[in-house]
Amino acid sequence: MITKTDEQILEAVADLHGIPAGAYNIRRNGEGIGRRSTENIIITPKSDKPGIDIEIKPGTKNESVHIPVILSESGMNDLVYNDFYIGEGADVLIVAGCGIHNCGDQKSQHDGIHTFHINKNARVRYVEKHYGEGEGTGARILNPQTVVEMEEGSFCEMEMVQIKGVDSTVRDTVAHLKANARLVILEKLMTHANQTARSNMEVNLDGENSSAQIISRSVAKDSSTQVFYPRAVGNNLCKAHVQCDSIIMDSAHIRSIPEISANHNLAQIVHEAAIGRINNDQLLKLMTLGMTSEQAEEIIIQCFLK
């Protein structure tokens, strides 16, 4: 049974208003509470460890699969392994995400390990949102691990978002790209209070004419701490661009460490990073329209993370 709290979390992390159309798997407090496969998307529980296998048949088009996770009990420590097998020529949307509602004094933690096997000429759009809420003193912890294996000519766009309320997160992403594969990663993150966030990315461009774009946008408020370590490794004729942009506020701390590594003389890799305060001219312009400084800041932050 889906509770009111479940509904609020599903809306926040997966934009769901009720049970989704198409294939889905909903996990709550370490157990599956709903699952549906379709003719082209088969979801199977693992037999040796917690998690599911999602098989998307070759040639599948215009279909989606939702796999949100809910933690609503204080003291939960949830670990899950999800493997995606995307068939040749498929074109699908995968919506994941985890929301923690913690009203107790014990930490609640979810570690999701997702592995993507993207076959030749397949296209994937992956959306992952993390969110925390609840009036308890217990920490809300999310540590996602993502592994991406891309075959020749495949395309993957990953949007990874941390909305608010997550006290601690360590995000690890590793990708390997074969010939003519293209990967786009957009990470958006906001921290406040004493929250900490670290993001480690390693993209290996192994195949000829592979390409990648890594964009990280973040806002750090109060006394929160962020560390970004994206790494692009060119092992063949390839192109990659790494961009990290951050807004720092109050007494926050941000470290941005973009790294580029070339192991082939035809690799073209570029990186850039910027950390700064909100632009005063933008604030003043919005305040002349009748906004308070707090309202103007919120508008600027929302547009920056959009």
Image (cartoon, rainbow, N blue to C red):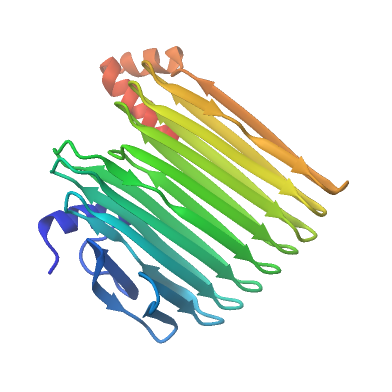
Frontmost residue, 123 versus 191: 191
Determine the residue positioned at 35% across, 38% down.
168
Q: Residue furthest bottom?
A: 39
Image quarter of the C terminus: top left
Number of marks in picture: 0
Q: Quadrant of residue 28?
A: bottom left
Rendered location of residue 99, percent (x, y): 27, 51
Q: Is residue 104 left or right of residue 293?
A: left
Q: Quadrant of residue 262?
A: top right
Q: Is residue 285 above or below residue 237?
A: above
Rendered location of residue 56, percent (x, y): 49, 78
Image quarter of the N terminus: bottom left
Q: Is residue 95 above or below residue 194?
A: below
Determine the residue positioned at 35% across, 21% down.
223
Rendered location of residue 114, percent (x, y): 46, 62
Rendered location of residue 55, percent (x, y): 47, 78
| Residue 38 visible within the image | yes
| Residue 302 visible within the image | no
Determine the residue positioned at 60% across, 31% down.
257
